[in-house]
Amino acid sequence: MSRWAAQRPHAVQGKSSGESSGGEKQVQTAGSNQRTSARRGHVKQVGGIGMLLHHSEDFNLTPQQEEKLLSKQLEFEIEKINLEAAVKIAKVRWRAAARDVNTTEKTAYAVIDDLTKAEANLRKMRFQHLKEGRTILNASQRGHLQKFHLLQSRQKAKAQGGGSQDDES
C-alpha cells in the first residue's frame, strides 16, 4: 500500500487506465479535491484579480485598469505568501503540541488560538484583496461581474449533473 493510501483510507483509490498490475499507480477518485468536487464556497473560487485579468476583454478593462490590477496582484501575492507561511508555522506548532504528551491544556488552547488567528487573517486578506480589486472596476463592470459569477455558477451546476430534466422522457 502506498503512503498516500495509508494516510487517506477514506479516499477511494483505483488503477488509472492503461496501468499494468505490476506498476500500480493509485489515483484519488474521491475525497476533498475542491477543483472537481461539488464543494464550493471557498473564496479562491470567487475569482479575484487573476480572474479579472484573465477575462479583461469580457469586462472591457482599460489598459489603466489592467495596470492597476497587475500592480495590486504583485503586492497581494507577497502578502499572501507571508500569511500562508504563518498558517503553516501555526500548524506545525499545533502538531508538535498535540504529539507532546506533557502539553498542558492551557498551552494546547493557546496554540489552537494562534492557528485560528493565522487562518482568519488569511481569509480576511483574501476578502480584502477581492474588495480592493473590485474597486478598480466601474459600476458597469461590477454589474457585469455579478452576472458573470451567476453564469459561471449555473454552468458548473449544469456540468455536475444539475442539467436539463428533459432527458428522462
Image (spheres, rainbow, N blue to C red):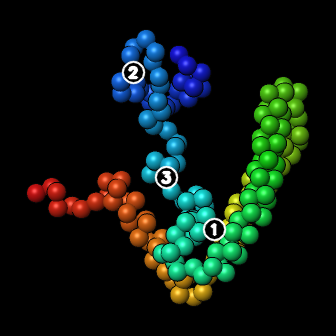
CA separation, marks 2 and 3? Answer: 30 Å
Q: Residue 47 in the image: x percent, y percent?
A: 57, 65
Farthest left residue?
169
Foreground mark, 2 or 3, reads: 2
Q: Going 77% across and 52% down the picture, which residue do you hit? A: 81
Dividing the picture into quadrants, the one containing residue 74 is bottom right
Q: Residue 72 in the image: x percent, y percent?
A: 73, 69
Residue contact at pointers 2 and 3, CB within 8 angstroms: no
Name the residue type under label 1: Ile
Residue 144 sits above or below residue 98 on the image: below
Q: Is residue 100 visible?
A: yes
Disc number at residue 39? 3
Farthest front residue?
63
Name the residue type under label 3: Arg
* Residue at mark 1: 49
Q: Going 60% across and 82% down the picture, which residue do you hit? A: 62
Name the residue type under label 2: Glu
Q: Going 38% across and 66% down the picture, which residue do you hit? A: 154
* Residue at mark 2: 19
Q: Tell which circle, 2 or 1, labels the residue nearer the N-terminal end.
A: 2
Q: Going 53% across and 16% down the picture, which residue do you hit? A: 1
Q: Tell which circle, 3 or 1, labels the residue nearer the N-terminal end.
A: 3
| Circle 3 crowding by C-alpha within 10 Å: few under 14, some 14–19, many from 20 | few
Secondary structure of residue under mark 1 = helix
Residue contact at pointers 2 and 1, CB within 8 angstroms: no
| Circle 2 crowding by C-alpha within 10 Å: few under 14, some 14–19, many from 20 | few
CA separation, marks 3 and 1? Answer: 22 Å
Disc number at residue 85? none
Instruction: Please state if 102 lies on the left or on the right of 50 as rendered.
Output: right
Instruction: Please state if 64 lies on the left or on the right of 24 as rendered.
Output: right
